[in-house]
């Protein structure tokens, strides 16, 4: 999933290439600063925050590659760790940052599912920001 590096098992939120603050698409960097899926209709990332938090906003930076038209995400779903009913959906993405705003949920684990844009080959994600706080 992550460029030329196969990642298996849990990656600490603070150590992952999707949560390290580097939102560039730098394929020279090792490990790669982004993740992608090729020749698939969907790609998913599961985030385990190791404790339950109140989640208010989630921002995802995707590459919709307007010049080469190789990369493209048509839709992003926010899902619970278990289950298929979306919590929220971004039906039309933009090249760059896409945000789930005004969320009000408590969760420890969440999934993001990206859907491939028609005529594209790669789903590419550079960074994810999860905003919230401790549950009171």
Image (tube, rainbow, N blue to C red):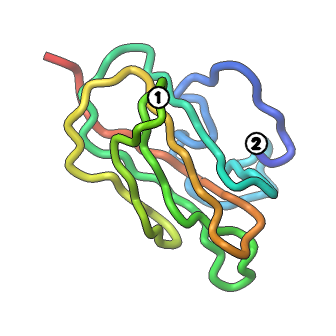
Q: Which mark is residue 83?
A: 1
Where 66 sits versus 136, above or below?
below
Which x, y percent locates residue 38?
79, 55
Q: Residue at the location (77% across, 41% down)?
A: 31
Q: Residue at the location (24% across, 31% down)?
A: 105
Labels 2 & 1 near each other (Cβ < 8 A): no
**Quarter assignment of residue 106:** top left
Q: Residues within 10 Å of mark 1 (few under 14, many from 20)?
A: few
Pick the front one: 53 or 28: 53
Which x, y percent locates residue 130?
38, 39
Q: Residue at the location (54% across, 50% down)?
A: 127
Horizontal side, residue 101 vs residue 62: left or right: left
Where 2 sits versus 80, above or below?
below
Q: Residue furthest bottom?
A: 67
Q: Residue furthest left?
A: 136
Horizontal side, residue 80 vs residue 40: left or right: left
Where 68 sits versus 3, above or below?
below
**Quarter assignment of residue 8:** top right
Which x, y percent locates residue 116?
65, 62
SS type, badge 2 = loop
| Precedes in sequence: disc 2 or disc 1 | 2
Q: Residue at the location (73% across, 71% down)?
A: 120
Q: Which mark is residue 93?
A: none
Q: Where's the C terminus, which quadrant?
A: top left
**Quarter assignment of residue 57:** top left
Pick the front one: 110 or 14: 110
Horizontal side, residue 71 vs residue 101: left or right: right
Q: Residues within 10 Å of mark 2 (few under 14, many from 20)?
A: some
SS type, badge 1 = loop
Residue that carries the numbered disc 2 in the rendered image: 1
Where 132 sits versus 66, above or below?
above
Q: Nearer the viewer, mark 2 or mark 1?
A: 1
């Amino acid at each position: 999933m992550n460029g030329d590096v196969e990642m298996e098992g849990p990656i600490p939120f603070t150590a992952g290439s999707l949560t390290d603050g580097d939102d560039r698409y730098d394929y020279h960097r090792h490990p790669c600063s982004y993740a992608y899926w090729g020749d698939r209709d969907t790609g998913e990332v599961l985030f385990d925050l190791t404790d339950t938090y109140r989640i208010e906003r989630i921002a995802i930076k995707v590459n919709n590659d307007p010049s080469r038209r190789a990369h493209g995400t048509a839709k992003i779903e926010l899902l619970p760790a278990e289950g298929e009913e979306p919590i929220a959906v971004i039906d039309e993405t933009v090249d760059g940052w896409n945000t789930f705003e005004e969320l009000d949920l408590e969760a420890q684990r969440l999934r993001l599912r990206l859907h491939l844009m028609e005529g594209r080959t790669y789903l590419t994600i550079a960074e994810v920001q999860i905003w919230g706080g401790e549950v009171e």
